[in-house]
Image (cartoon, rainbow, N blue to C red):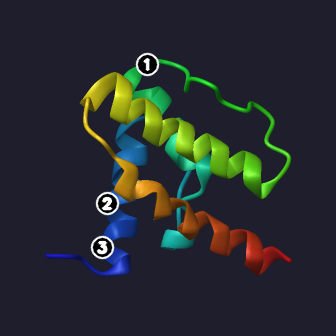
Amino acid sequence: MAGSDAEWVTIANNLLFKCHIHLRIHELQDCDANVFIALYQSILGEKVPDLIVIPRSQEDDAHNVQAVIDSLALDYLQVSLSHITALYSVSRRKYSERR
């Protein structure tokens, strides 16, 4: 059963807090590449492979989110996560709202 956006925001903020990550989100659109990278690095204790450290574009952020997904799939879960590539569309909305 899917929760409301407010419930998912609460879950995300609880996870960020428990991982000692000083980021908070106010709506789901706030879950950008930085959130996924910070969670990956905090939970796994490793840097994201192939990370673009200073992203300069939406494409760089998309690359970084995909690097998280690919590493989880190949290095940790050993299952395909190809169905999650659309996840980045949440972050993409944030960019379009800024322009």
Q: Give the amino acid type for the residue marked by disc 1 in the picture.
A: Gly
Which mark is first along the chain, 1 or 3?
A: 3
Q: Which residue is labeled 3 in the image? A: 7
Q: Quadrant of residue 11?
A: bottom left
Mark 2 packing: few (<14 Cα in 10 Å), some, or many (20+)? few
Q: Is residue 20 left or right of residue 6?
A: right
Residue occupying the point 51% across, 73% down:
27
| Count of marks placed on residues | 3
Quadrant holding the N terminus: bottom left
Cα separation, mark 3 vs mark 1, equals 27 Å
Label 1 – label 2 distance at C-alpha: 21 Å
Task: Provide the secondary structure element on which disc 1 rests.
Answer: loop
Callout in the foreground (1, 2): 1
Residue at 54%, 48% (x, y): give it. 35
Rendered view: 37 above or below 61: above
Q: Earlier in the sequence, mark 1 or mark 2?
A: 2
Q: Secondary structure under badge 2?
A: helix
Residue lying at the far top of the rendered structure: 46
- State yes or no: discs 3 and 2 in contact (Cβ < 8 Å): yes
Q: Amino acid at mark 2?
A: Ile
Q: Which residue was labeled with disc 2?
A: 11
* Left or right of 95, for residue 46: left
Q: In the rendering, at what x and y percent does residue 4 appear? A: 30, 81
What kind of residue is marked 3?
Glu
Q: Nearer the viewer, residue 33 or 18?
A: 33
Q: Nearest the camera: 83 or 46?
A: 83
Q: Position of residue 56 (x, y in %)?
A: 85, 46
Residue 46 coordinates in the image, percent (x, y): 48, 18
Read off the residue under disc 1: 45
